[in-house]
Amino acid sequence: MFKFAYPEYLYLLLLLPALMALFSYFMYRKKKALKKFGNMPVLKRLMPEVSLKKLYWKFGFVLVCVTLFALLIAGPQFGSKLETVKREGIEVMVCLDVSNSMLSKDIDPSRLDKAKQILSKLVDNLEDDKIGLIVFAGDAYIQLPITADYVSAKMFLSTINPSMVPTQGTAIGAAINLAVRSFSPNETTEKTVILITDGENHEDDAVGAAKAAIKKGISVNVIGIGSTKGAPIPIPGSNGFLLDKDGNMVITSLNEAMCKEIAVAGEGIYVQADNTNNALKVIQKELDKKSKSEVESKVYTAYDEKFQIPACFLLLFLMVEFFILERKNRFFSRIKLFS
């Protein structure tokens, strides 16, 4: 298992685009100044020892050094010891709707982004529980098997987008059925499903799936994402919106009646997400009501520091950058290996 001890230092990587922009501006000004003295081919013959290519090489090594420095102070670590740990908790399987309608912005910043924010904070609040993640649209897929590895949970969460599921639609029933099959076989552990969806264009028997889940002792809670007033669906990578076959703008709205029906059938709760953290608080309160029981988790209990690796490469590249001169070396320029 790999992780960074201080991942906040990785924000230093944001310096790379700024450095590239400054270097591009510097080279533009340098070339512009040189052109005032004459044509570049003529100037190159007058200054045979000057090498602009070496400036690019030096800058390339500077970028590599900045990257390695950010990785170094972020504290790379590798898990060295995997142990089975017994804890008191519950199991939570999250089913997240990633259909195109979740891109609508009737809730800030969008339905999908709001859902990811709720899940991220939910993971932060977990202690000894297990969590899994299923994404669904027209089909349902396990994104993260049930685990106590919260770092991996947040990592997978950040990569979620509608393109992950090629078939569009809203197969809520398939997602619930897959969630029920994805829990661990431990019969004493309380299990619950958290369904996050706008409930629109459901294509299967979601209510029936919720009833089947509760028969196995698995409750189904629903977080409704979006507004009942509706909003257009943005097309990713453009400023346009999704149109129907007649050229009319498609308006998507929260199917609150369906969401409530699923929650009732699954003997869970329904809450509508808005621009506050109320939905998270309600769901967290519901999870806290669940009786905790012993769950086994395989976790890394020891991590080895691996800062030496980027440190060695950083030192190497700094030395290389130092010895690259802006002027051509007379001695090496005389060596013609392939003449």
Image (cartoon, rainbow, N blue to C red):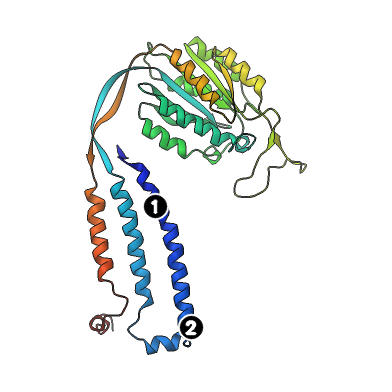
Quarter of the image that includes the C terminus: bottom left
Q: Is label 2 in contact with label 1 (beta carbons under 8 Å)?
A: no
Give the residue number, with chain letter if any, for mark 2: 35
Query: Residue 13 — which label?
Result: 1
Please state the horizontal and vertical placement of residue 271, each as a whole percent of the image: 58, 21
Would you identify the image quadrant in which residue 87 lies?
top left
Question: Which residue appears at 53% of the width and 39% of the height?
Answer: 161
Please state the horizontal and vertical placement of residue 40, each as a whole percent of the image: 45, 84
Please state the horizontal and vertical placement of residue 45, each as a whole percent of the image: 39, 89
The disc labelled 1 sits on which kind of residue?
A: Leu
Residue 318 to residue 304: above or below? below
* Mark 2 vs 1, N-terminal side: 1
Please state the horizontal and vertical placement of residue 321, each as a whole percent of the image: 28, 67
Question: Which residue appears at 23% of the width and 65% of the height?
Answer: 319
Disc 2 to disc 1, C-alpha distance: 34 Å
The crowding category of the residue bearing disc 1, from other C-alpha atoms within 10 Å (few below 14, some 14 to 19, many at least 20), is some
Please, what secondary structure does the residue beneath circle 2 have?
helix
User: Could one spot residue 98 in this view of the protein?
Assistant: no
The disc labelled 2 sits on which kind of residue?
A: Lys
Would you identify the image quadrant in which residue 269 lies?
top right
Side of 173 where 311 appears, left or right: left
Question: Which residue appears at 65% of the width and 22% of the height?
Answer: 256
Side of 141 where 81 appears, left or right: left
User: Could one spot residue 51 in this view of the protein?
Assistant: yes
Would you identify the image quadrant in which residue 206 lies?
top right
The crowding category of the residue bearing disc 2, from other C-alpha atoms within 10 Å (few below 14, some 14 to 19, many at least 20), is few
Quarter of the image that includes the N terminus: top left
| Nearer to the camera, 285 or 83 | 285
| Nearer to the camera, 311 or 205 | 311
| Nearer to the camera, 269 or 98 | 269
